[in-house]
Amino acid sequence: MLVSAKEMLKKAKAGQYAVGQFNINNLEWTKAILLTAQECNSPVILGVSEGAGKYMGGYNTVVGMVVNMIKDQNITVPVALHLDHGSFEHCYKCMEAGFSSVMFDGSHYAIEENVAKTKQLVADANEKGISVEAEVGSIGGEEDGVVGAGDIADPKECKAIADLGIDFLAAGIGNIHGKYPSNWAGLSFDTLDEIQKLTGDMPLVLHGGTGIPIEMIKQAISLGVAKINVNTECQLAFADATRKYIEAGKDLEGKGFDPRKLLAPGVSAIKEAVKEKMEIFGSIGKA
Ligand SMILES: [Zn+2]
C-alpha cells in the first residue's frame, strides 16, 4: 500500500533527518529502491517525472507496477509515490491514477497564479489524502526539459506558499539538477535559515541532491530540509556498472546477454547508491 509523504516528512523534520526521493525509470529501478528501503528499514519516496511516467507507459502502469511490487515483495516500510515537477494538469492525472503525493511546479508562474493554482490543488488533494509539494524559486539545471536558472527563493514568497496548506516546500537555494559545475557557488544557508524561521515546522525539500558535499547535506538537514531528491546519481551508477559489464565482454560469455544478467550489475549499483544516500540522510531504521 502507498502512503502520502506527509507523516513521514513531519517525522523526519522533527527527528532531524531526511527521507530520500529516488526517481524511478523502470522496473529495475523500482525494485532496487524498494528492496534497499526495506533492507534499511527506511521510509522512501519514489519520484516519477512526467517524462519518466510517459516512458514507463503511463501513470496507471506506474501505479500498477509499484503497488503490486510492494505487495509481492512484502515491502512494509512507508512508500510514497510522488509526481516530480508536475504541471497542474499532470498533478490531477496522477491523483486520478493513484499516486499518493504530487509536486506542483508552479515556479514559472507569477506568484499570484502560483498561489491560485496551488490553493485549488491542495483542496482537491487533501480530500483524497494525497500530499502536495510546492516550489518557490526555480531550481537550476535541466530536468526533463524543465530548465531552471537556479534562483535563490524569496523567503517571504516561501512563507506565502507554505501558508496555503501544502505539506512540504521546495525552495531554490542555489541547488541544481544534474551534475554540479566546478565553479558552483554552493548552497545559500542564510536563505534556508530565513525560510525555516518563517515557515516553522514545514518540511523543506532539497532538489538536485546529486553531488552536494556531505557536509552541506548535513547542514541543510539541520536547517529543516526533510526530503532530498536524488535522480542523476542512480543514473550514473547504473550506466557505469552496465558499461563495465559490456566492456569486459561479459554479455558475450555464455548467456551473459540475458537481460536479467545484463542489467544485474546496474541494479546492484543503484542499490548501493541508494543505501549510501540513506546513511547520509539519516533515514535508516526510521520506518
Ligand atoms: Zn527537482
Image (cartoon, rainbow, N blue to C red):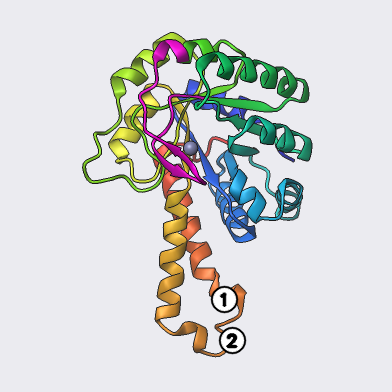
23 magenta-colored: no
User: Which numbered tag is attached to residue 279?
Assistant: none
Image quadrant in which you'd find residue 99? top right
Q: Position of residue 212 (x, y in %)?
A: 33, 40
Circles 1 and 2, Cβ within 8 Å, touching? The answer is yes
Residue 191 to residue 213: above or below: above
Q: Position of residue 134 (x, y in %)?
A: 55, 24
Image quadrant in which you'd find residue 163? top right
Q: Amino acid at mark 1?
A: Lys
138 magenta-colored: yes
Q: Position of residue 270 (x, y in %)?
A: 49, 57
Tag 2 residue? 255
Left or right of 111 in this view: 219: left
Disc 1 to disc 2, C-alpha distance: 8 Å
Q: Which stretch is magenta? A: 135-157
Counting residues from the start of the chain, the first of labels 1 and 2 encountered is 2
Left or right of 213 in this view: 244: right
Residue in view at x 72 percent, y 20 percent: 126
Residue in view at x 50 percent, y 26 percent: 107
Q: Amino acid at mark 2?
A: Lys
Residue in view at x 39 percent, y 45 percent: 210
Q: How many marks?
A: 2
Residue 86 seen from this side: yes
Left or right of 39 in this view: 153: left
Tag 1 residue? 261
**Residue 159 vs residue 70, the one in the foreground:** 159
